[in-house]
Amino acid sequence: GREWRTKGLPRAVWDCGTCCMLQACIGIPMWLIAIVFLWFYAIVAPTYVKIESELDKKWGFVLHDGHEFTAPVWMGEFGAGEKGTYWVNFVRYLSERDLEWAYWPLNPDKLGTGWFDDWGNFHLFDDGERWEEDTYSILDTDWMTVRAPWRVLDMKPLMSSPAGAVLNSQPCQRSVLGRTCGG
């Protein structure tokens, strides 16, 4: 403010060069480090190696033979709404570990009681329970057509014992595979 004139205080000397130098020497490298970290994470996070290490750390270690903690693992009720990186990597993990599993759900509808908002808070429907379409299901609303054939095609190698390799296949092309795609 202007109080320095009335109190006889000397005006503070501001060195623009020092301020700009500090910004350049500290601020810019910090931004570069942040950008490099985010770039690296964007490349590493969706890889199979990342999901493999995370699942092995959480529960996959119990599959190693010859330890007192060795145990069978049943992967129950997994599913995905679309074929993305997570789906491909997770199904590959199940195949390489030859895990037993159950896909969820088969039925095309579900009894809903509410919904989650963006903050994770659950809200009840005003009109109580109601039946809703379940887009993760194997079957479509007619109970005969396969909703997303890529799910069944990707899970088919898991059904044999030992599990076969799951290829990173593209969505089912009806023009090529015909009725094999379902429906």
Image (spheres, grey):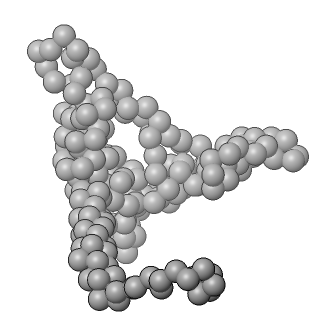
Q: What is the quadrant of the N terminus in the image?
A: bottom right
Side of 54 where 118 appears, left or right: right
Q: Is residue 160 visible?
A: no
Left or right: residue 127 compared with residue 81 = right
Residue appearing at x 63%, y 52% in the figure: 119
Counting from the top left corner in percent of width and height, residue 128 is at: 85, 41
* Residue that extends furthest to the top in the rendered view of this protein: 68
Residue toward you, 45 or 96: 45
Would you say 139 lies left or right of 110 here? left
The structure residue drawn at horizontal position 52% and vertical position 80%, both measured from the top left corner, is: 9
Seen as rendered, the residue at the extreme left is 66
Q: Is residue 98 visible?
A: yes
Instruction: Please give the name of the residue rendered at 24% of the width and 35% of the height, measured from the top-left corner.
Output: 56
Question: Which of 1/111 is in front?
Answer: 1
How many numbered circles are shown?
Answer: 0
Q: Is residue 177 above or below residue 62?
A: below
**Could you say which quadrant of the image residue 178 lies in?**
bottom left
**Direction front: furthest residue:** 8
Residue 99 image point, x, y percent: 28, 32
Q: In this view, does 67 lie above or below 149?
A: above
Q: Position of residue 177 (x, y in %)?
A: 33, 66
Residue 141: give x, y in percent of width and height: 64, 54
Q: Which residue lies at the image location 22% right of the left edge and 27% below the top edge?
A: 61
User: Relative to 136, is 53 on the left or the right?
Assistant: left
Could you say which is closer to the camera, residue 23 or residue 122? 23
Q: In this view, does 36 lie above or below 90?
A: below
In front here: 156 or 38?
38
